[in-house]
Image (tube, rainbow, N blue to C red):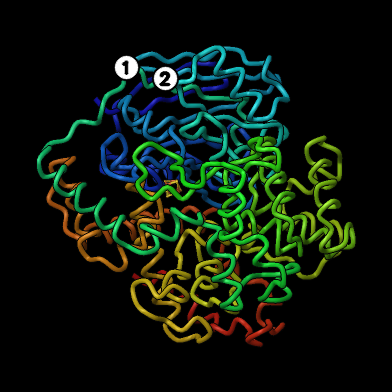
Amino acid sequence: MFKILRVNMSDLSIKSEEIPEAYQGLGGRGLTSAIVLKEVEPTCSPIGAGNKLILAPGLLGGTNCANSGRISVGAKSPLTGGIKESNSGGQAGQYLAKLGIFAIVVEGLREDGKLYKLYVAKDKYELSPADDLKGLGNYATVDKLKNEFGDKAGFVSIGPAGEWKLAAASVAITDTEVRPTRHAGRGGLGAVMGSKGLKAIVIDPSEGELAPIVDKEAFKGAAKRFAKALSEHAVTGQGLPTYGTDVLINIINEAGGLPTRNFSSGRFEGADKVGGETLNKITVERKGNPTRGCMTGCVIRCSGDFLDKKGQFVSKWPEYETVWALGPNCEIDDLEAIARMDRACDDIGLDTIETGNALAVAMEGGVKEFGDAAGAEELMAEIVKGTPLGRILGSGAAVVGKTFGVRRIPVVKNQALPAYDPRAVKGVGVTYATSTMGADHTAGYAVATNIMKAGGDVDPLKAEGQVKLSRDLQVATAAIDTAGLCLFVAFPVLDIPDAFNAIVDMINAKYGLSLTGDDVGSLGQRVLKMERDFNMRAGFTSADDRLPEFFKNEKLSPHNEVFDIPDEELDTVFNF
Ligand code: SF4
């Protein structure tokens, strides 16, 4: 009933197979990482024939569980050189799960420069030429595909950045409005898809059905308890639905952890102009939708539509990390310009976090002035045109820093840091340093406990307690990503014990298991161990589990803190 699709781009063959024993009991990130570990040679070229691109819904995908339709995309990363899982909202995860597909594994390589699209429906799979989509942005690509396949399908695509195999290229996933606004952004997975000559995947869910459930009554009860917890928690029930993730701009600025001018200050004078409160206000004034889910079944609905002054759709609400990367980190306080750059990134298919960091590092290197919004848009235009400068910018912050002789390059394992300065939010600094993914806030979101005090209170400015906090969260997150849940469920899970119990109960009811909470924790540990194993065999050592040195010797205002967690402590994060 459940299957894995193997799509070989070298000979254009497609095979459907039962889930092998080694992958049983896994979904989402757990499944993509298991396949990468077992089937990809760790030292292979990320854009060569040996790499594989895997797309997998989570263990709870295809059900009525709230917020359970994430899709994990995994491969060896062109950006970090290590294992990569980047997950996204949108409709693709739920649609694949309803077709009974646990994973699509894209193998081989196209060396003739031709592009293809993959059509997936109930028991029907087909590869066909897609050269007519060559060079198109994600929006135009999806428009053409909608004309051909209708607007009830879900689409996964790459823009020109993926075709050019840029190390910051993303994989786009369409949302509930069939727009390519959701992205598996991090780590350059779009470049892997581009190397294989796969421009798009069309997922036709019309004959799909809800995933089979062993104990329907038990599942229904647990799903109800889970949705209730999501609605009752202040963050997921009020803050996120009203202001989106951009609500964090003023919160993190107040905490002195909003990286400004390429991580040179923790406060931004123009924060309020780009914060969630302003985003909500102008959206309401322009009669846009300020509360929208990115996938069916989302009860939090942290997204919205950003309209320009004439009321025309520009982009979905830019996420907090996007607003920060293209805004405060470049000293830009122009929300309109930020939304246009968000749209440009979605269209060309680039990770907004990596791109915003690349722009800020270029500004530090003298390419443009900090605060120059028009200049930042000119740099975006270079990327869109694919000029040599644009391709350097699209290759990520580390390449830009080396190109322009910049000393302060905020990357770990070559991946740019997200929107929380590790000197002011030290728990997330531990996650950045040690995550198997490179600098990644989602891998162990210690901001929740450091700043929002969810699940306890660990002082964000002190070294004590941060390693344990990051460890626990990295383990829990690996399990949440394996279940296919949106990470924002972590807030109620940290604060309301029954929310976590409900997740365990749903997994048990769906598969007829009797897992305990500890078993789910062990699942998270197992995933992290697999990822560490791959990275070690790819050549990573403990020296790669470190922040850049400027975080250790440059004090950050306003708290005048450095990142002072000893290396020996960082090396204990995975002691379990
Ligand atoms: S909470 Fe936000 S990111 Fe999560 S599923 Fe809903 S709209 Fe998507």
Foreground pick, 141 / 165 = 141
Picture coordinates of residue 76 (x, y %)?
Answer: 55, 45
Residue 170 appears in the figure: yes
Measured as percent of width and height from the top left, residue 448 is found at 43, 69
With 312 as the anchor, is 247 left or right in this view?
A: left
Q: Residue at x 68, y 83 (%)?
A: 557
Of residues 164 and 35, which is closer to you in this image?
Answer: 164
Q: How far across and down, in percent of the image, does residue 472 sit?
A: 36, 69
Does residue 529 show up? no
Report the residue at 34% width, 40% height from top.
Answer: 297
Ligand 1 has an atom within 8 Å of the beta carbon of the residue at disc 2? no
Q: Report whether 303 appears left or right of 520.
A: right
The amino acid type, in three-letter code, at marker 1 is Glu
Q: How many marks?
A: 2
Crowd band around label 2 with a 10 angstrom C-alpha radius: few (<14), some (14–19), many (20+): many
- Asked if labels 2 and 1 touch by Cβ distance under 8 angstroms, the answer is yes
Three-letter amino acid code of the residue under disc 2:
Asp
Residue 422, relative to residue 89: is it above or below?
below
> Mark 1 vs ligand 1: CB under 8 Å?
no
Q: Residue at x 62, y 44 (%)?
A: 286
Secondary structure of residue under mark 1: loop
Callout 1 environment at 10 Å: few (<14), some (14 to 19), or many (20+)?
few
Q: Is residue 191 left or right of residue 428?
A: right
Q: Which residue is mark 1?
A: 207
Q: Residue 186, percent across and down?
A: 58, 49
Report which residue position mark 2 lands on: 204
> What quarter of the picture does the N terminus occupy?
top left
Q: For this rendering, which residue is in front, 352 or 58?
A: 352
